[in-house]
Amino acid sequence: SQQGEEDPQALSIQEGENATMNCSYKTSINNLQWYRQNSGRGLVHLILIRSNEREKHSGRLRVTLDTSKKSSSLLITASRAADTASYFCATNKTYYAGNNRKLIWGLGTSLAVNP
Amino acid sequence: GAVVSQHPSWVICKSGTSVKIECRSLDFQATTMFWYRQFPKQSLMLMATSNEGSKATYEQGVEKDKFLINHASLTLSTLTVTSAHPEDSSFYICSAADLPVETQYFGPGTRLLVL
């Protein structure tokens, strides 16, 4: 089941520009994660932000989390053609007893960075 | 670190046959493995969660007898699609995680085509 919704669904920008993707979710979470998927491949974990954090950076990535609005944003600065991929947000909440958690996935944003 | 392999990457089979997909964590012990299905240009759909040495937990609507999951060791989980039909054609992705399950590490995916 999906609880996250990303917008925009598709984004096309020029190399060097910044790309911003948003994610909204519905229930309380332990953390929110962003993953990237190149066409026809598996997913790669980009960054994890915990529910008590508001902002996190990793290289050219900046993630914000607003738990009051149940939303997050992923900013990729100085984009490159190699950033072309689909980006998914996923929220992590304890669904089972103990440590067995599953991720609830958003629908994804397809980013095209044109050289 | 955190490398997950999947085999095979591509499989074409005839309707009615069974297909086994392997998912291995190469450099860490995966207490929990997840199996996903993904349709073109869509998000991931969780099929089941498997813990080493115990029965898999299937998501609602996923047929247990159709999609057999075995997690026999801390580094290997298998998904067997039994009596495959053309509607089972899809991209199957596994992921692995250690306790506590937060970040998931994904395999490269297996594309199944049932003729």
Image (tube, coloured by chain):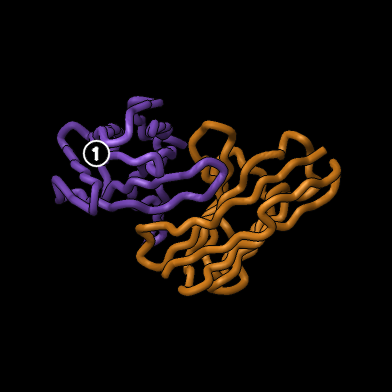
From the rendered image, report the letter of the chain displayed in orange. B
**Residue A67: x and y, percent?**
18, 39
**Residue B20: x and y, percent?**
73, 57
Q: Residue at x 39, y 36 (%)?
A: A106
The color chain A is rendered in = purple
Callout count: 1
Considering every residue shown, the one lying at the far front of the view is: A115
**Residue B83: x and y, percent?**
81, 46
Q: Is residue B37 left or right of residue A91?
A: right
Q: Which residue is mark 1?
A: A75
- SS under mark 1: strand
Identify the chain of the residue marked 1, using the numbered disc in the image: A
Amino acid type assigned to the residue bearing label 1 in the image: Leu
Q: Residue at x 71, y 55 (%)?
A: B80
Is A53 placed above or below A10 here?
below
Q: Is residue A14 visible?
A: yes
Is B68 placed above or below A11 here?
below
Q: Residue at x 77, y 50 (%)?
A: B82
